[in-house]
Amino acid sequence: MLFSDIKRVIEQVSRDKGIPMESLIHTLEEALESAAKKKLGSHIDVEAQYNPDAGEIEVFQFREVVEEVTNPDFQLSLKDGRKLDPDCEIGDSLGTKLDTTSFGRIAAQSAKQVIIQKVKDAERNAVYDGFIDRKGEIINGIVQRVDRGDIVVNLGQTEALLPAREQIPRETYRRGDRIRASIMKVLQDSRGPQIILSRTHPQFLIALFRSEVPEVAEGVVNIETASREPGVRAKIAVSSQDSGVDPVGACVGMKGSRVQAVVQELRGEKIDIIPWSPDAARFVCNALAPAEILRVVIDEDNRAMEVIVPDEFLSIAIGKKGQNVRLASRLTGWHLDVKSEASYSQAMKEGYAALMGIPGIGMTLAEALYAEGFTTLQDVADAVVEDLLQVEGVDEDMALNMIQAALQTVASEKNKDRQQAETDTEFAPEAETGSDHKDDSETTLIDENRQVPADEAATPESENE
């Protein structure tokens, strides 16, 4: 089996399949070694070598030069060895070139199978190596088919999968449509590498801005973080490495041209571009814009913030179905609790009143305790001395007295509640017993001393913050 002009074939396969030439040559050498052993026996010592000058794969059988030959497959007499190499000596190993055309059909078929399998393996490895370092990049492809909601995308040299959960809601594709998505995962599978795409991941949004905004691509403007509700709304936080470059303006573009290009790709998804700040409170205020923020109470331990807004800005800060505050929370990485000014003031009054119920605590000390996060009697009762010493004007003796007084007050209130519950149970009217299988809806307890107006029959639902 003469491989004439094999170099041209190797170069063409390497170019078409994207496989390195060295890998193809190694595959062919292994295939011919396998064919030789199939013909002559698996025990022989053979070696295949690619000769680029001759344009063929040469196969050599190696045998040791000995005085007396006992095994012709492994040994060669000195006389025969001198015919091959006049300078050979006893113990040398000489290679004899084999005629590959004599391997026969079975050996050739075996070589073919080895080549096909090795080429497939090399092709898989080439695809994996070509995509493993491209995570987060945007890639263009053509819809090959739709299988149970999942889209198989033809990328040219391989196929990728866009799962249904990674597709923007309400967008549809047909076979032959062009599609853009970001590479989310590259998995090595026994059937070959599997490339998972996404159009819903925040990284896709970032990659789109990188392709549309030169300042982002050049690193002058950084997209610090992003959060999305795909197809509906998104937020990105941007900063600038150059004080002369406005990061928000750069991403918006002239008359909104840059951001509109991204919006169109995302099927009308609204995008809020927010200036990033290293100060967590300021960053949260920016993320909740355009709502006006009156006060931010930070809980570092639980990474939470209580955000107080004017009553008229409460619905804006929360957004439709809580969307604005939800996206802001994901963007900043803080748990946000948005409250109206009236609600916060009422809670603060109740907190002051509860704290002032502890003997020895006046308004000034109650304000100091409240500012440090001790807003209820239970907070003081659960505190340790070291915690209360952080409050201005509190010494160790005062801390001990406050904890003891709070514990007694809490215990007293729990005792009152228990006694009240026992009293209510003792004097509760018993339901009439008529039928053994009486419907529960027919038994109703009514306070006869109270007249219930008709408009109190339905209780309005509380505002969902």
Image (cartoon, grey):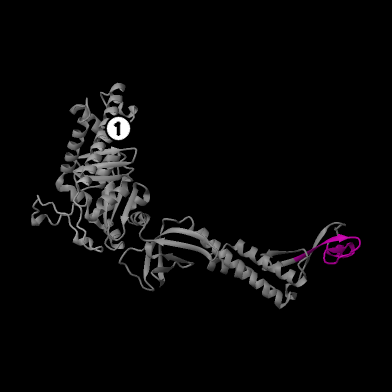
Which amino acid does the dot numbered 1 rest on? Ala
**Which residue occupies 34% across, 52% down?**
214
Q: Is residue 398 left or right of residue 443?
A: right
Q: Position of residue 409 (x, y in %)?
A: 25, 32
Is 94 in the magenta? no
Q: Position of residue 6 (x, y in %)?
A: 64, 70
Q: Is residue 216 left or right of residue 75?
A: left
Question: Where is residue 113, by image quadrant?
Answer: bottom right
Q: Position of residue 210 (x, y in %)?
A: 35, 54
Q: Position of residue 1 (x, y in %)?
A: 70, 74
Q: Nearer the viewer, residue 226 or 108?
A: 226
Q: Nearer the viewer, residue 204 or 90?
A: 204
Bin the neighbour count of mark 1 within 10 Å (Cα to Cα): few under 14, some 14-19, many 20 and up. Answer: some
Q: Secondary structure at mark 1?
A: helix
Is 76 in the magenta? yes
Question: Where is residue 65, by image quadrant?
Answer: bottom right
User: Magenta span covers which residues?
Assistant: 60-84
**Which residue occupies 65% across, 67% down?**
28
Q: Nearer the viewer, residue 366 or 34?
A: 366
Residue 435 shows up from this direction: yes
Q: Above or below — where is 70 with respect to 343? A: below
Q: Which residue in the structure is indicated by mark 1?
A: 381
